[in-house]
Image: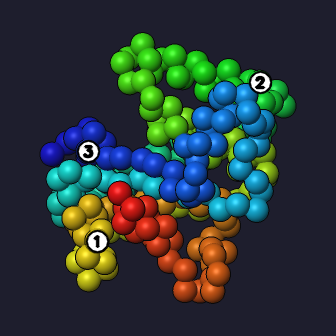
Amino acid sequence: MAAATIASDSHMAMVLPDDIGSRIADFVAGRSGFPFIAGDETMCLMYIYGKSAGVRPEQVQQVADLAQRTAGQMAIDIDGYLNGPAGRLDTEYIRSKYLNRELQLSVEGRQGRLAGDPSILSDCFAQHVAYHRQEYFFGLYGPLKEGELTRDVRPALLGRMVMVCYNKKNEQELGPGRRHHHPLIPVYVWFGQK
């Protein structure tokens, strides 16, 4: 299976904050301004590889390469917001960017997907990390085994690889009881609610 197939059998979502869809909708509708995620809130992007077919042992390196390219692109995007013109983090500039993407999705026949669109979610993460001048980290896990998963999420995650990206310096800065808060817990909760 080629790397392109791994890429096409992947999915991305923002699992924290859990109401990101309504926040983006409110922002696009003009009911809120930028930033619409506070600096003390945890953001978590989730990338799942092998969503429908799982990841075979010979595909693990392909997934790692794709994950590394994704992380590299996020670093470029964040740097662009940090070091680019100040207007790139202006409410109206960002809103127009989201509206243009919404129009593009509409033309492509994918209406109603703005809040779940990977381009918007990646941009949203990069914009807020840059605005709040936060550090961030990526973690790649898997292929996930049966003993690492609760019964309710096994069908969705068994044999898959998952990369998470947080707006924290490292894993130790996550949640209450920091040493015991594993980066995949929000992913498990998100899949458990599906």
- Horizontally, is 48 left or right of 146 in the view? right
Residue at 28 percent across and 64 percent down: it is 157
CA gap between label 2 and label 1 equals 42 Å
- Horizontally, is 103 left or right of 94 in the view? left
**Secondary structure under the numbered disc 2 in the rendered image:** helix
Question: Do tag 2 and tag 1 residues touch (Cβ < 8 Å)?
Answer: no
Give the crowd class for mark 3: few <14, some 14-19, many >=20 residues within 10 Å: some
Q: Amino acid at mark 3?
A: Asp
Q: Is residue 8 above or below residue 153?
A: above
Q: Earlier in the sequence, mark 2 or mark 1?
A: 2
Q: Amino acid at mark 2?
A: Glu
| Near-viewer residue (59 or 40) | 40
Foreground mark, 2 or 1, reads: 1
Q: Residue furthest right?
A: 86
Q: What is the number of the mark on residue 152?
A: 1
Q: Earlier in the sequence, mark 2 or mark 3?
A: 3
CA gap between label 2 and label 3 equals 34 Å
Q: Which residue is labeled 2 in the image? A: 92
Where is the N terminus found, in terms of image quarters? top left
Q: Which residue is labeled 3 in the image? A: 9
Instruction: Choose top left, top right, bottom left or bottom right for residue 108.
Output: top left
Percent position of residue 81, x then y: 73, 37
Percent position of residue 111, x then y: 42, 24
Whether residue 26 is visible here, answered yes or no, is yes
**Secondary structure under the numbered disc 3 in the rendered image:** loop
Q: Amino acid at mark 1?
A: Asp
| Near-viewer residue (14 or 192) | 192
